[in-house]
Amino acid sequence: AEIWQSVPLAPPDSIFKLTAAYKADTSKDKVNLGVGAYRDDNDKPWILPVVKKATQILLNDETLDHEYLPITGLSDFTNGAAKLILGSESPAIKEGRTVSVQTISGTGANHLGALFLSRFYNWNGPRKVYLSNPTWANHHAIFRNVGIEPVDYAYYDPKTIGLDFSGFIQILKNAPDRSIFLLHACAHNPTGVDPTPEQWRTIAEVIKAKGHYSFFDCAYQGFASGDLDRDAWAVRYFVEQGIPLLVCQSFAKNAGLYGERVGALHLVSVDQDTASRVKSQMSVLQRSEISNPPAHGARLVSLILNDPELFEEWKGDIKTMAERIKAMRRELRRLLTEELHTPGNWDHIVNQIGMFSFTGLNGEQCKELTETGHIYLTGNGRISMAGLNTGNIRYVAEQIDRVVH
Ligand code: PMP
C-alpha cells in the first residue's frame, strides 16, 4: 500500500473557501465581506503611494544585491520597527533590553514567539496559553503546533455586542500565576471590540499582580484609529508598567504588504544581558526554520521607517485607509438606523474598530445573506469593512435589513 493512503483530508480554510465561493458566483450584485485585506472605493487592492515610491528607490539603488540577510533580519528594519511599536523614546530600547527579530509577517512572529515560549518559558504547570474567545483562528493552530494548549478567556459578549470586561477580569484573576495571555494590541480580530484605556489599565494591574506574561499580537497598528501612536498605546503602557511581554508585529495591513511577509517579533526583557541571551536562542530557532528572512519587503519598510519624509507620507496613506473604513462604518449605521429603520441597535458598527465588524447577525441570517443576497461573510457575522464601498453599501444595508426582518 502507498504510505500516504491513511492521510485524512483536511477541511479547507474557511476564509479561502468563502473567497472561492464568491469568485464562482455570477451575480452582478455579489459582495465579498470575508476578505481581511484593504480594498479601495472601487473594490481594488491598494498599493500605498509611499510603497510605490520606496519600490522605485530600491530599483534605482545600484548597491543592493540578493545576498542573504542576517539570521535575525535587516537591522535597520528591526530597529525602526521596534521604535514604531514601543515608541521612539522608549526607555526599554535605550537601555538595550529589547530583542527584535525579523519574521515572516505577523504569522511568523506569532509562531516564533510561541516556539520560544514553548522552549524557554518557566512553565508553572501545564503548557497553556489563554486566547480571547473568539480570536483569529490561526492562533489556536500556531500554539498547538508547538505543543501549547489554547484555553479560552471570556472576551466578547453577544448580549451587548461588546466587551465582557468582568468575565475577562475574572479569568485573569482565576488563572494560575504566571499564565500566558494573548492580547490583541488594537483592532481585535474578529470582533473589532477593544478595551478602553481605562479598562486596559485595570487589565494591566491584574496581569501585573498575578505575574502573567503578555503575548501581544499587533497586526493593525495605525490601521485601527488612523494614528500609529494611539494604536500602540496599550503595548507602551504595559512596557511602562514593567509587565513582561513580547509583541508580534505585522506590516501586512498598515503598509499593504500582505504578500511580501514583513513582520517582526519584539521581546522586552529586564536587562541587556538577558536580551542578548534571548536573542541568541531566537537566532538558533530562526536558523532551523527559515535560515534568514526575506529581504525585499523589509527593505521597503526600512526606507519608510527611517526616512522622515517617507514616514510622514506613510502616515497620510494610513489615514486614507483608516478614514475610508470609518466612513463606511458611519454610513452603514446611518443607512440601517436612519433610512431603513432596521430593528435593533447598530451603534456597535461605529464603536468597533479596525478592519472588521461583528454585526451580531446569527448563523442563519449570514447564510441567508450569502444564499439569496450574494453577500459573502463568515458564519459568525463578521464583516470586513474594507469590502464595503460607496457602490455597494446601500445594497448591503438593504440585504441586512431584509434578513433581520
Ligand atoms: N494576527 C492577527 C490578529 C491577524 O488578524 C493577522 C492577519 N489576518 C495576523 C496576525 C497575521 O497576518 P500576517 O501574517 O499576514 O501578517
Image (spheres, rainbow, N blue to C red):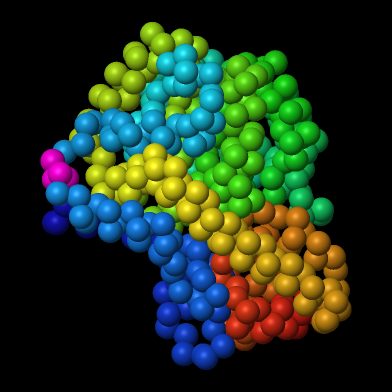
Query: At x 75% / y 60%, what residue is drawn?
Result: 350
Task: In the rendered view, tell whether residue 264 sits above or below residue 56.
Answer: above
Query: At x 67% / y 62%, what residue is drawn?
Result: 326
Q: Main secondary structure of the magenta part?
A: loop
Q: Position of residue 225 (x, y in %)?
A: 64, 51
Q: Is residue 210 magenta?
A: no
Which one is nearer the viewer's eye here, 309 or 152?
309
Q: Position of residue 386 (x, y in %)?
A: 56, 67
Q: What quarter of the picture does the N terminus occupy?
A: bottom left
- Tell me: 262 left or right of 383: left
Task: In the rendered view, tell whether residue 52 sits above or below residue 314.
Answer: below
Q: Is residue 181 visible?
A: no
Residue numbers of the magenta segment: 63-67
Q: Position of residue 7 (x, y in %)?
A: 28, 54
Which one is nearer the viewer's eye here, 231 or 105?
231
Which one is nearer the viewer's eye here, 69 or 283?
69
